Amino acid sequence: MNEPLTHSHWLAHAAPKVVPAVATSTVLILGRIWNANGAEHSVGNAALMIVLSAGAGVAGVFAAAGRSGGDGVLAGIAFATSGSLALAGVAGYADGLPLPLLLWAVATAVAYGIAARYWRTDRRDTLAYERGTTIRHEEHAHVERIETIRGHTQIEVAREGAAYAEALAQALAARAALPGFNPQTLEKAGLPELPAGKDAA
């Protein structure tokens, strides 16, 4: 039963590591398909990709330099789109594979460099959360242990008190049942004595 959970857990950790390579490879493949379908040496198609790539890059610059320090996620998406369009344009326009493969390798390396920063941040946040959770669990466990010890102590004290009260009641009953028992004699002797009403009870 635990094997499928472990397998899916492993896949969940491994999947983000291959996303940059899959993304750049997909762009390269689509660019080469476009090349085979008439984009090779097409100035109009190349100009279109240049305009789109430059527009995405400008949008990324504006997103990064926006108010309150900019939006890092939006800027990253814009720059990734710009790079993808540039790679697709070169892969579609070029007549050979060396230049598209070179750009694919550079784009993949850049994508992994950017992703590594977010992975480190995410790992730090995860470790900090797990550390805080562990500390809270330890504090709660310590409080629970103290409360458990206190509860056991109170139970033991109550049991001892009940046993003492029962023994005292039995002693009083046994003393009152003795033949010739005279409370006045005990009082004259200076021994402690309960009031007559409690003896009768």
Image (cartoon, rainbow, N blue to C red):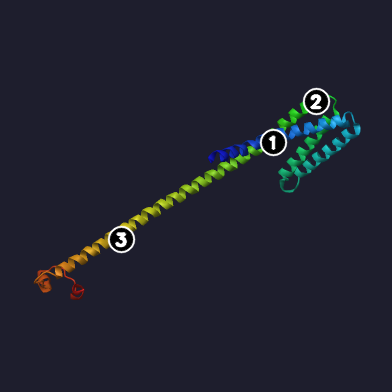
Residue positioned 72% across, 31% down in the render: 108
Residue positioned 18% across, 72% down in the render: 199
Image quarter of residue 103: top right
- Judge the density around disc 3: few (<14), some (14-19), many (≥20) Cα neighbours within 10 Å: few
Residue positioned 53% across, 46% down in the render: 132
Q: Amino acid at mark 2?
A: Leu
The tag on residue 19 is 1
Residue 85: x and y in percent read 81, 36
Q: Secondary structure at mark 3?
A: helix
Residue 84: x and y in percent read 78, 35
Mark in the foreground, 2 or 1: 1
> Residue pushed farthest front?
1
The tag on residue 167 is none
Asked whether 117 or 87 is in front, the reply is 87
Q: Are marks 3 and 2 in contact (CB under 8 Å)?
A: no
- Judge the density around disc 1: few (<14), some (14-19), many (≥20) Cα neighbours within 10 Å: some
> Residue pushed farthest bottom?
197
Q: What residue is disc 3 on?
A: 158
Image quarter of residue 190: bottom left
Question: Of callouts 2 and 1, which one flags the residue occurring earlier in the amino acid sequence?
Answer: 1
In this rendering, would 68 be left or right of 91?
A: left
Q: Is residue 170 above or below residue 82?
A: below
Counting labels gives 3
Residue 151: x and y in percent read 37, 56
Q: What residue is disc 2 on?
A: 99
Q: CA distance from mark 1 to mark 3?
A: 65 Å
Q: Secondary structure at mark 1?
A: helix
Q: Amino acid at mark 1?
A: Val
Q: Quadrant of the C terminus?
A: bottom left
Q: Is residue 163 above or below residue 72?
A: below
